[in-house]
Image (cartoon, helix red, strand yellow):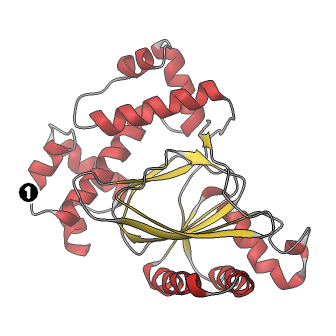
Amino acid sequence: MKAIFEPISNDLNQSFHYDIFEKDDFETPWHFHPEFELTFICESSGIRSVGNSIQSYYPEELVLLGSNLPHCWKSNSTKKHLAKSVFIQFNKDLLGEGWMNKIEFQHIKKLLKHSENGLLFNTTIAKKVGKQLLEMQELPPMYKLLNTVEILHRLSFERFETLSLGGHFETNVKTSLRIQKIMKFVESNYQLKINSQQLSALVFMTPVSFSKFFKKSFNKTFTQYLNEYRISKACELLRASNDSIEQIAFETGYVNLSFFHRQFKAITRFTPAQYRMNF
């Protein structure tokens, strides 16, 4: 599966890239880069795609992404809030060639190995690290680097949720365009009835070829992907609105309320009512 390659803007004399993103929306498409990335969401909510994972995201989340792992954050178009994040991107030679093989960095090495599938940290540590990341803005480069290493070491002892459960990430333009078209179509039409015939025609494939292509790419069927996307949108609405559960089910493409409840619990482990109460 091929995302868009994103070259990281970085001074050749620096070993990593630190920045704060602040615009109306997270506008970067589904993309990848060879650098590791640690991102803290300051403001905005919407859908986060990491590898074959599709979930809602909210402020104060902290995610560590491995090298060449496709990802994007898409802001909720119904929310007119600022999209803001602070992030660090660094390559495997952050402290020089072979630094991770030194005994002092064994825990960081293990953490970065786990990050191949994307890691989501608990809210408590996310808030603390997010505050530290924001405060780094005023630091000179050397202290930014020291803080980065300290943060990685700190996170290596924290619990995390693994985001992506596999997938086949190829690197060719034709596949990239197919994936982009599919994701954009789902984003625009998830409230409607969608079938594989529509998607196969969109990417100029037969229905059988499309099904095989999608399963190979995402390690899940298109139906599974669509349900996960819809349930992620339902989670947003349950947290952000007072609409009834029945109305939210309808707004996210479910005409059968019982089926919506089954899918919601299978994906989130909560009923819609439990999710709204807890979050």
Q: Quadrant of the N terminus?
A: top right
For the residue pair 80 and 149, the one nearer the viewer reads as 80
Considering only vertical position in the picture, is 126 above or below 232?
Answer: below
Q: How crowded is mark 1: few (under 14 residues within 10 Å), some or many (20 or more)?
A: few
Residue 143 rendering spot, x and y as whole percentages = 70, 88
Amino acid identity at mark 1? Ser
Residue, x 65% and y 86% (percent of image)? Answer: 154
Considering only vertical position in the picture, is 150 above or below 201?
Answer: below
Tell me: 80 left or right of 13.
Answer: left
Residue 38 rendering spot, x and y as whole percentages = 60, 69
Tell me: 268 left or right of 65.
Answer: left
Residue 55 rendering spot, x and y as whole percentages = 40, 55
Find disc 1 in the rendering and name its residue: 244
Residue, x 30% and y 45% (percent of image)? Answer: 230
Tell me: 2 left or right of 235.
Answer: right
Residue 212 rendering spot, x and y as whole percentages = 55, 24
